[in-house]
Image: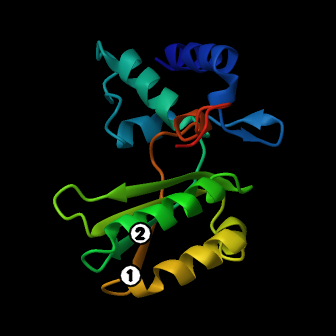
C-alpha cells in the first residue's frame, strides 16, 4: 500500500505540479494517516477503492488555489428609487471592475423584491484593495449619489471563496465590454 501511495504521489508530482503545495524547494504531500482520518481512504490495506479515494483526496488537497476576499453588500432602497440606484451602481461597478486588486464587482437585484440589491465585490486581498476602492472617485460619487435612496443602512458580510479555486473561475472575459 505504501508503494501505491508513493507511485500515486510521484505521478501527481509529475503531472500536476501546479497543484502541489510547495514549501521552499520540497513538496508536501498529505500523509497516509491524514487520508484515513479524513475518511477519504480506507484504513484497510485490502480495500479495493483505496487507491481511487486516495487519488481524489490528494488531488483536492494539493490544489493551492486562490483565496479571494469576497464582500456581499446588502442594500434595501426606498420604493421608487430602484432605477436610479441601479444606474448609479452599474456605473460604479463598471469602474470598480477595472481597479487593480478587484477580481469581480457584480450588481444583483432581488427578483421577488426589486428594492433589494446585493453588491458582490471580490478582491485579491482583504485589506489593501478594499481600502483603495473606497478612496476612488467613482466610489465616493456612488456613495453620495445613493445615500438618500437607501431605506436602511447597507450591511456587508465578508467571505472567503471555497470554489472556484482558480482565478479563471472568477475573472471577466478578456477583451469583452462589461455591460
Read off the residue under disc 1: 149
The quadrant where residue 3 appears? top right
Upstream in sequence: badge 1 or badge 2: 2
Most extreme residue toward the right, as rendered?
Answer: 25
Read off the residue under disc 2: 84
Residue at 30% x, 85% y is 151
- In the image, 148 versus 112, the foreground residue is 148
Q: Nearer the viewer, mark 1 or mark 2?
A: 2
Mark 2, secondary structure of its residue: helix
- x, y (%) of residue 73? 42, 70
- How far is the residue under mark 1 from the one under mark 2? 8 Å
Against 8, residue 78 (above or below) is below
**Mark 1 neighbour density, 10 Å: few (under 14) some (14–19) many (20 or more):** some
Most extreme residue toward the left, as rendered?
Answer: 112
Residue at 69% x, 15% y is 14
Left or right position of 90 against 102: left
- x, y (%) of residue 87? 46, 62
User: In this view of the protein, can residue 127 be seen by the observer?
Assistant: no
Amino acid at each position: 500500500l505504501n508503494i501505491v501511495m508513493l507511485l500515486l504521489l510521484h505521478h501527481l508530482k509529475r503531472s500536476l505540479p501546479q497543484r502541489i503545495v510547495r514549501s521552499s524547494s520540497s513538496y508536501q504531500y498529505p500523509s497516509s494517516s491524514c487520508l484515513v482520518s479524513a475518511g477519504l481512504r480506507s484504513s484497510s490495506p485490502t480495500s479495493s477503492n483505496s487507491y481511487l479515494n486516495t487519488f481524489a483526496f490528494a488531488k483536492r488537497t494539493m490544489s493551492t488555489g486562490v483565496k479571494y476576499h469576497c464582500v456581499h453588500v446588502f442594500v434595501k432602497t426606498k420604493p421608487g428609487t430602484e432605477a436610479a440606484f441601479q444606474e448609479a451602481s452599474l456605473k460604479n461597478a463598471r469602474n470598480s471592475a477595472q481597479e487593480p486588486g478587484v477580481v469581480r464587482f457584480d450588481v444583483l437585484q432581488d427578483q421577488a423584491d426589486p428594492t433589494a440589491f446585493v453588491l458582490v465585490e471580490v478582491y485579491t486581498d482583504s485589506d489593501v484593495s478594499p481600502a483603495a476602492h473606497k478612496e476612488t472617485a467613482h466610489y465616493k460619487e456612488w456613495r453620495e449619489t445613493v445615500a438618500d435612496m437607501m431605506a436602511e443602512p447597507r450591511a456587508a458580510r465578508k467571505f472567503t471563496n471555497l470554489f472556484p479555486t482558480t482565478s479563471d473561475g472568477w475573472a471577466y472575459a478578456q477583451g469583452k465590454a462589461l455591460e
